[in-house]
């Protein structure tokens, strides 16, 4: 049996926006998010990430095919000696590319190629996404905070 090939990271460009929007829609569905954005709206948001000097959008390719993406940035963290941490906003592996360790290999590659050793990485996983929670636990992430929400009571 042949070992799986290593993924490759590539910085996204405007030509990638439709594919990023489709993957973002799949991510929203997979994690059970209530985000109602259309593909056009997701594409516009992705354009905003590309246009921002703060955000990075990396595509994950394997065997010459697009297999996923990651969106991340540096943000302030006064508890860190460097004063910063990495916020990994989105990490997605296409459904048809899952199950053979690509997510693990792609995240490891992202850490080695984009993040300096020892940098703190923060991400959020929805409560409705136990598969994502299990994946990130396997990647060494530990719970740090719990976000709670509710709607305000109606006025009387």
Image (cartoon, helix red, strand yellow):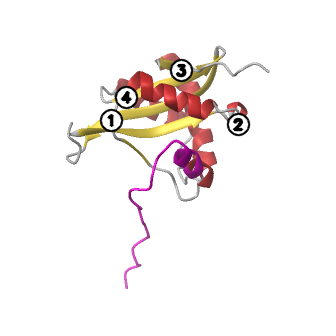
- Over which residues does the magenta segment extend? 133-156
**Tag 2 near tag 3, CB within 8 Å:** no
Q: CA distance from mark 1 to mark 4?
A: 7 Å
Determine the residue positioned at 45% across, 49% down. 124
Mark 3 is surrounded, within 10 Å at the Cα level, by few (under 14), some (14 to 19) or many (20 or more) other residues, namely some
Q: CA distance from mark 2 to mark 4?
A: 25 Å
Question: Residue beneath label 3, please?
Answer: 16
Q: Earlier in the sequence, mark 2 or mark 3?
A: 3
Question: Tag 2's secondary structure?
Answer: loop
Q: Nearer the viewer, mark 2 or mark 3?
A: 2
**Would residue 133 appear left or right of 44 to someone viewing this image?**
right
Q: CA distance from mark 4 to mark 3?
A: 23 Å
Question: Residue beneath label 4, please?
Answer: 115
Q: Quadrant of the C terminus?
A: bottom left
- Could you say which quadrant of the image residue 21 lies in? top right
Determine the residue positioned at 35% across, 33% down. 73
Closest to the observer, 28 or 38: 28
Question: Residue beneath label 2, please?
Answer: 99
Q: Quadrant of the N terminus?
A: top right
Placement of 146 over or under 119, stated as above or below: below
**Tag 1 near tag 4, CB within 8 Å:** yes
**Tag 4 near tag 3, CB within 8 Å:** no
Question: Residue beneath label 1, please?
Answer: 119
Q: Earlier in the sequence, mark 1 or mark 2?
A: 2
Q: CA distance from mark 1 to mark 2?
A: 28 Å
Q: Please provide percent x and percent y for residue 28.
A: 57, 45
Q: Earlier in the sequence, mark 3 or mark 1?
A: 3
Q: Nearer the viewer, mark 3 or mark 1?
A: 1
**Tag 3 near tag 1, CB within 8 Å:** no
């Amino acid at each position: 049996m042949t070992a799986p090939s290593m993924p490759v990271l590539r910085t996204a460009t405007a030509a990638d926006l439709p594919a990023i929007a489709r993957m973002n829609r799949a991510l929203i569905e997979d994690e059970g998010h209530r985000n109602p954005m259309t593909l056009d709206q997701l594409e516009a948001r992705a354009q905003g990430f590309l246009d921002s000097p703060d955000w990075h959008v990396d595509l994950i390719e394997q065997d010459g095919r697009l297999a996923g993406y990651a969106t991340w940035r540096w943000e302030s963290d006064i508890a860190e000696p460097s004063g910063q941490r990495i916020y990994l906003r989105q990490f997605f592996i296409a459904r048809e590319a899952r199950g053979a360790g690509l997510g693990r290999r792609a995240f490891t590659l992202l850490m080695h190629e984009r993040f300096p050793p020892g940098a703190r990485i923060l991400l959020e996983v929805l409560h409705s996404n136990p598969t994502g929670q299990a994946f990130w636990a396997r990647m060494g992430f530990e719970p740090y905070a719990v976000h709670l929400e509710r709607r305000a009571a109606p006025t009387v």
